[in-house]
Amino acid sequence: QVQLVESGGGSVQAGGSLRLSCAASGSSYIMGWFRQAPGKEREFVAAVTWTGGITSYADSVKGRFTISRDNAKNTMYLQMNSLKPEDTAVYYCAARYQGGNWAAVYEYDYWGQGTQVTVSS
């Protein structure tokens, strides 16, 4: 069992930055970030392997967001720069033990409660 707790959400103007954190109670092979805007399906943002050596990003955030993890602290991060209004959503941390399709919501075993990110124009 892995418990995940997100923090770091908030409100920012377009072009600004935020850093999200996800504290985990246990280890996992892959950890990822997803987001869900009102009226939309939950979508993949980024994922990282246990060692942090392999990352994956959604095209919409490539070059603006950076995912990382500190295993000594059991914490994953999402540095979000050049934020846009369309980045507004609840951001969720997720973890999984197996490989496969990193972007598939249904393949993740554990989820956090989410943290709101609001970007104003």
Image (cartoon, rainbow, N blue to C red):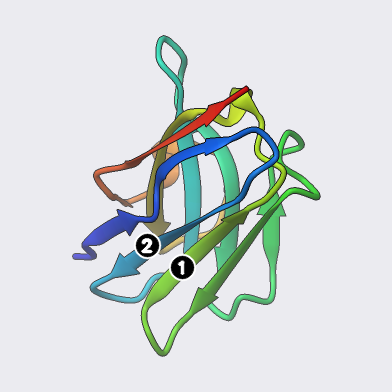
Identity of the residue drawn at 45% across and 21% down? 37
Element under disc 1: strand
Which amino acid does the dot numbered 1 rest on? Met
Task: Place residue 89 in its image quadrant.
Answer: top left
- Helix, strand or loop at disc 2? strand
Q: Relative to 115, is 27 above or below?
A: below
| Dot placed on the residue nearer the N-terminal end, 1 or 2 | 2
Q: To which quarter of the image does residue 54 belong? A: bottom right
Residue 101 in sight from this viewpoint: no
Residue 18 place in picture, x, y as percent: 54, 52
Outermost residue on the top side: it is 39
Eyeballing the image, is 13 above or below 112?
Answer: above
Q: Indicate the position of residue 103 as horizontal and vertical percent values.
A: 58, 41
Most foreground residue, 89 or 12: 12
Q: CA distance from mark 1 to mark 2?
A: 5 Å
The answer to whether residue 77 is above or below residue 35 is below
Q: Residue furthest right?
A: 63
Residue closer to the observer: 65 or 58: 65
Q: Is residue 49 above or below residue 46?
A: below
Residue 5 visible in the displayed image: yes
Residue under the image location 27 percent in, 59 percent down = 4
Residue corresponding to mark 1: 76
- For label 2, the residue is 22
Does residue 46 appear to the left or right of 15 in the view shown?
left
Q: Position of residue 95 (x, y in %)?
A: 39, 58
Residue at (37, 62) in percent of width and height: 22
- Within 10 Å of disc 2 (Cα), the crowding (few <14, some 14-19, many 20+) is many
Crowdedness near tag 1: few (<14), some (14–19) or many (≥20) residues, C-alpha within 10 Å: many
Q: Dots 1 and 2: beta carbons under 8 Å?
A: yes
On-image quarter of the C terminus = top right
Front residue of this view, candidates 20 and 111: 20
